[in-house]
Amino acid sequence: AQSVTQLDSHVSVSEGTPVLLRCNYSSSYSPSLFWYVQHPNKGLQLLLKYTSAATLVKGINGFEAEFKKSETSFHLTKPSAHMSDAAEYFCVVRGPYSGGYNKLIFGAGTRLAVHP
Amino acid sequence: DTAVSQTPKYLVTQMGNDKSIKCEQNLGHDTMYWYKQDSKKFLKIMFSYNNKELIINETVPNRFSPKSPDKAHLNLHINSLELGDSAVYFCASSQRTDGNTIYFGEGSWLTVV
């Protein structure tokens, strides 16, 4: 079965320092993986997705993630945090096709705090 | 223009009431969804419709009844609201049913008192 584990429930960084949000996945086949961001009282926005093309995926707002099959990881990084990056981040794996649908399976989320 | 819009954004209601949340997407997508986010921020799919037909129902109580009058709309009606229904409900859409690139609305915060 497909699943994702976000290794940190909270991450706190200073503005201008690198961001690392960790995600490990479990999948019985080559997965499709996503990162979504949710700002306070806002909906979910797709940051980036991996669908078996290049292993280093670039997303919006300077974020990128690297798919590492050997480590079953899909960590999200950004070289320099900005105050506006403070939000909840969700790692997501696409589940198997069943009943006419591929279900998205969400991780528990990582709350990113950015301090001045 | 908002791609996926849902109303109301905030709703406070008493136990036992019936309420609806409306959702519309202007992306021309064939598939729409309702997700529930609980107090721990955990997101789980509730329903999915493709071209007005229900294609997934994730063991949601039958007090919850989705209705899709056309492929651009998917409304959620909830009967006999319970305290445990308090959550954020997200509408979403995608081009196909393969779950690739789902666009979410901004959420509807439901509080049952």
Image (spheres, coloured by chain):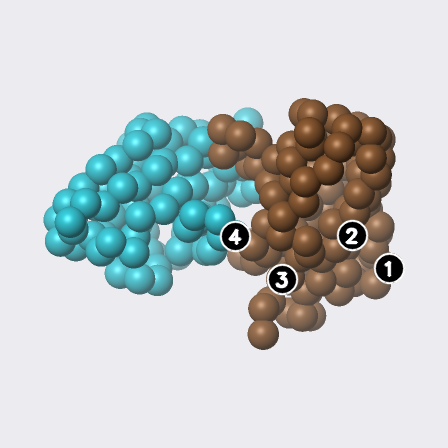
Left or right of B16 in this view: A79:
left
Subunit ID for the residue under disc 4: A
Q: Residue at x 61, y 43 (%)?
A: B109
Q: Is residue A111 visible?
A: yes
Q: Report crowding for label 3: few under 14, some 14 to 19, many 20 or more residues within 10 A (C-alpha).
A: many
Numbered tag placed on residue B4 in the rendering: 3
Q: Quadrant of residue A79?
A: bottom left
Q: Secondary structure at mark 2?
A: strand
How crowded pointer 2 is (Cα within 10 Å; few <14, some 14-19, many 20+) is rated as many
Q: Secondary structure at mark 3?
A: strand
Give the letter of the chain under mark 3.
Answer: B
> How far, Cα to Cα, is label 4 from label 1?
24 Å
Measuring from the top left, give residue A12's x and y in whole percent. Answer: 22, 37
Q: Is residue A44 visible?
A: no
Circle on res. B75: 2
Q: Which residue is mark 1?
A: B69
Q: Chain of mark 1?
A: B
Residue type for callout 2? Asn
Residue density around tag 1, few if under 14, some if 14–19, many if 20 or more, within 10 Å: few
**Disc 4 to disc 3, C-alpha distance:** 10 Å
Chain for numbered disc 2: B
Ranked by sequence position, the earlier of labels 1 and 3 is 3
* Callouts 4 and 3 on one subunit: no
